[in-house]
Image: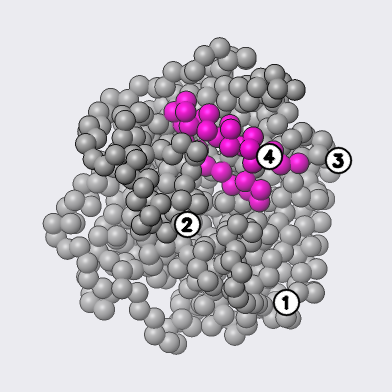
Amino acid sequence: MLIQNYFIGAVCQKSTFSYPPKEVPEMPPCNFKPEEYKGMSKERMMEIRRLNCNPMTMKVTYYKKPVFVHQGYMQWLWDVDGKRYLDLFAGVATVIAGHCHPKVTAAAEQQLKRLWHTTNIYVNPFIHEYCEKLASYLPDPLKVIYLTNSGSEANDLAMLMARLHTGNYDIITFRGSYHGGSTSAMGLTSVEAYKFPIANGIGCTNTMCPDVFRGLWGGSHCRDSPVQTIRECSCAQGHCMAQEQYIGQLQETLATSVSRRIAAFFAEPLQGIGGAVQYPKNYLKEAYKLVRERGGVCISDEVQTGFGRTGSHFWGFQGHDVIPDIVTLAKGIGNGFPMGAIVTTPEIAASFAKGAHFNTFGGNPLACVVASSVLDTIQENSLQQNCLHVGTYLMIELAKLRDKYEIIGDVRGKGLHIGVEMVEDRVSRAPLSPQAISEIFEDIKDMGVLIGKGGMYGQTFRIKPSMCITMEDADFFIAVFNKSIHNYMEKKMNVS
């Protein structure tokens, strides 16, 4: 597959890492030269962060020795000291085209000179041009769009639309799911760290996540992924016992925990913060059928899986061979510009119009122009194809490391939506300790790579880079990850 212009990667080849690693891997070259940083000192930034920023800001700050970001270009970030990092987390799966991508930057600069903001109480061309373009990427009957500022807001409104349209109230989500941090969306979210001790999300019920690695059932060919689990499986070809068992759990939830008629079922095509968890093939197809039999609508949260990130399809739900009733979007939609969207059918949209809802910033001209240029960039630079090409290679190479190191329990994902779950050992599959995760995480950063963390216990490394990374970048990360795991294992052995 051809990756155009400066996105051309190395030809797929055998892994370049050695075992055991001898030295710190060499970072791929980059021709971009960042500006010299002449701003506030790191000490002053941290003082303000502690004194004037909400304590939550310090709580979520990554690393014991934080990264002080100064400038970005494509898949690279530079800190205030001029150190370069390969960014494989992209602002939490958000900067999909690359930091300061020239085409997106030019579109934003041009629009800044023309019109920053007006609201949709006036008719302007920018929102209409973008809505028409975005709708063309979605299958019928998903053609009606409402623009917001974030994914949490999009999911809030999706809940409201589902309840208005169905006349029902109960909503079902997976355990381990993340659908936002607002008071309403907190009910959809099922990760303890993101819950507060207040009444929230009334009418939301969580069902068992069909996790074929950590869950009760799973086998060696459950997933639509280039890498399968290490669990044994005796299922006949085309028959998945795990899928049937997890569907049974959903049926039990429907029979015991919600009313006879429900409003909606929310699911990410692959879980994001939950740790890139993948479901058995055909699970969502059967789940959608059960939900619709109960009068509910099916909602696909594409905040982290949309816009080609999974490689095989433009939208994550397409990989499950389903068409939802509502799709929610954010993050990559604006390459980091604050924006979200709800896409639905004309019938559901009409139910929302029974009342009045106004969003000051949703769909403002600058956001729409930026988002439109993102869609163009994905196509012009073959970014979806790059996700499939580089992501598949990356997962296969990570699976080789899984086979070498017992603490790597699972490698999963599609395209450049990848999770690496760390365990104490493969027999128990007990999560690797937070201390160990932090040590490996810090070491990877010190060698020049930024990744994320997730999972119910923070035990899963998340790899969701800008979609322009190259094969050379993938080889560099594999070498760094190999070195970091080797360093940890060697230290552990010396201590014991």
Decide: few, some or many residues near mark 1? Use Cα within 10 Å; few <14, some 14-19, many ≥20: some
Res 60 visible: yes
Q: Name the residue at the top extreme.
A: 22
Q: Name the residue at the right extreme.
A: 234
SS of the residue at dot 3? loop
Q: Can you tell which mark lies on residue 234?
A: 3
Instruction: Give the distance between the C-alpha atoms of the residues marked 2 and 1, in whole angstroms.
Output: 34 Å
Q: Amino acid at mark 2?
A: Met
Res 3 visible: no
Residue of label 2: 56
Is residue 138 rendered to the left or right of residue 109?
A: right
Residue of label 4: 433
Contact, mark 3 vs mark 4 (Cβ under 8 Å):
no
Q: Amino acid at mark 3?
A: Ser
The quarter of the image holding the C terminus is: top right
Q: Amino acid at mark 4?
A: Ser
Residue drawn at (79%, 62%) of the image: 249
Residue of label 1: 258
SS of the residue at dot 1? loop
**343 is higher (above) or lower (below) than 492:** below
Q: Name the residue at the bottom extreme.
A: 354
Decide: few, some or many residues near mark 3? Use Cα within 10 Å; few <14, some 14-19, many ≥20: few
Q: Amino acid at mark 1?
A: Val
Residue drawn at (69%, 81%) of the image: 261
Nearest to N terminus: mark 1 or mark 4: 1
